[in-house]
């Protein structure tokens, strides 16, 4: 008998442009996983509204993000690709799971602490309960593995705790998910400040997937380095150059030793534009394809509608089971 494929769930917020960091750190790995696993890839718009969004922009970005997922090589036939708010079971399960999550647990989430410091004038209940919604995303589909960056590991661990608690009270209901941190998932740092993560919330040092070549080149030429001259990987003393080397390797497939050798004896004036060129070539086909797909509204609509239907089918199975177990009257 054929072994059942493991299930994967992951998502990205449409709260800004997709970045080179999200491509190299996440989406490119998803593409590699889509044949071996049973995958759901979500556009988590309900997460995005935990901080204030411009409505027209949120709508536009949600659709553009789907086009970009496809342009990166995610196949809507192989994967379930959908928009979170199209599957109401996420919000429903989140309410229920919130009643099995401690206030203290949510208070300890480092991302909550960071984001509430960043948005001190708008610390909403949604921002606080965000990890519960994320737990619902994952548990609804009985996901085995959740590809995430280091910064989301704590949320996946909380998801496990909630699932385990629920299973303990009501008997086995949820699969316990595991964070899946890909070995090749290079973490890119800001070009502006190589000690902080490249992030859409800091657009200055961030390369976007859809940036045209001249913008990419400009960002790399301006990248912060150090006052030495050697192109050498040394994270502690040369964070800027190390980050550029990491990006160069990720874009070209070269090893670190090959990259260092290629630029031995050459200054940063040669190295920085070379990294820019490598990124331009990596992103060119993706940008061109995404620009083409995004104009095909009918196609995109058919993808997200089919995705939502398929997701709802799976989500409903879990939600009904949960509702029955906790004592809700069957509809
Ligand atoms: N919280 C994640 C982030 O900001 C996005 C996300 C929401 C997610 N739900 C998820 C990731 C479920 C993995 C699984 O990056």
Image (cartoon, rainbow, N blue to C red):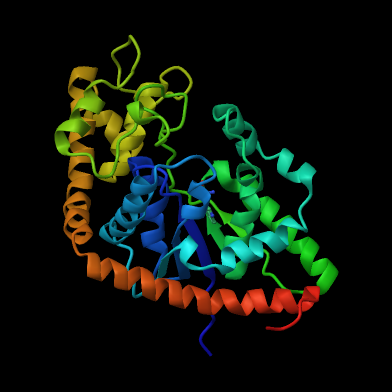
**Residue 63, x across and y down, in percent:** 32, 57
Q: Give the residue drawn at x 34%, y 46%.
A: 57
Depicted 55 relative to depicted 294: above or below = above
Front residue of 223 and 122: 122
Q: Is residue 122 above or below residue 157?
A: above
Instruction: Name, please, the residue furthest toward the top.
Output: 227
- Mark yes or no: residue 121 visible: yes
Report the front residue among 125 and 187: 125
Q: In which image quadrant can residue 168 be found?
A: bottom right
Compared to residue 295, the image places residue 272 above or below, namely above
Q: Quadrant of the C terminus?
A: bottom right
Please state the horizontal and vertical placement of residue 193, each as a whole percent of the image: 41, 22
Task: Tell me how many marks there are.
Answer: 0
**Residue at x 38% of width, y 76% of height:** 306
Q: Quadrant of residue 171?
A: bottom right
Asked where in the image residue 133 lies, by quadrant, the reply is bottom right
Q: Residue at x 60, y 43 (%)?
A: 127
Residue 28 % position (x, y): 36, 54
Q: Residue furthest bottom?
A: 1
Residue 98 x/y as whole percent: 72, 56
Is residue 9 toward the left or the right of residue 133 in the image? left
Nearer to me, 245 or 41:
41
- Toward the right, the furthest residue is 169
Decide if residue 20 is on the left or right side of residue 25. left
111 over 62 or under it: above or below: above
Decide if residue 143 is in sight here.
no
Q: Residue at x 24, y 23 (%)?
A: 264
């Amino acid at each position: 008998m054929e072994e059942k494929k493991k299930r994967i769930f992951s998502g990205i917020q449409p709260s800004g442009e997709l970045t080179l960091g999200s491509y190299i750190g996440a989406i490119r790995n998803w593409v590699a996983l889509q044949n071996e696993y049973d995958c759901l890839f979500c556009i988590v718009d309900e997460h995005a509204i935990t901080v204030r969004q411009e409505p027209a922009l949120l709508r536009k970005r949600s659709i553009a993000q789907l086009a970009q997922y496809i342009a990166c090589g995610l196949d809507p036939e192989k994967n379930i690709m959908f928009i979170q708010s199209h599957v109401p079971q996420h919000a429903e399960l989140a309410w229920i799971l919130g009643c099995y999550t401690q206030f203290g647990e949510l208070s300890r989430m480092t991302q909550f602490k960071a984001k509430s410091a960043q948005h001190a004038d708008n610390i909403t209940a949604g921002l606080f309960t965000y990890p519960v919604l994320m737990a619902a995303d994952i548990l609804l589909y009985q996901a085995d593995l959740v590809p995430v960056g280091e910064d989301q590991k704590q949320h996946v661990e909380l998801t496990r705790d909630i699932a385990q608690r629920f299973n303990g009270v009501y008997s086995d209901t949820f699969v316990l998910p595991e964070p899946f941190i890909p070995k090749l998932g290079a973490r890119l740092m800001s070009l502006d400040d190589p000690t902080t993560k490249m992030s859409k919330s800091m657009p200055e040092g961030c390369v976007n997937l859809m940036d045209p070549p001249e913008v990419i080149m400009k960002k790399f030429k301006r990248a912060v380095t150090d006052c030495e001259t050697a192109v050498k990987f040394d994270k502690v003393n040369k964070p800027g150059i190390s980050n550029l080397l990491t990006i160069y390797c990720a874009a070209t497939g070269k090893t670190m030793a090959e990259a260092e050798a290629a630029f031995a004896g050459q200054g940063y004036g040669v190295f920085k534009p070379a990294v820019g060129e490598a990124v331009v070539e990596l992103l060119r086909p993706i940008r061109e394809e995404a620009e083409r797909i995004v104009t095909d509204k009918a196609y995109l609509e058919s993808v997200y509608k089919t995705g939502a239907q398929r997701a709802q089918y799976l989500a409903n199975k879990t939600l009904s089971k949960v509702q029955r177990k906790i004592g809700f009257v069957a509809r």
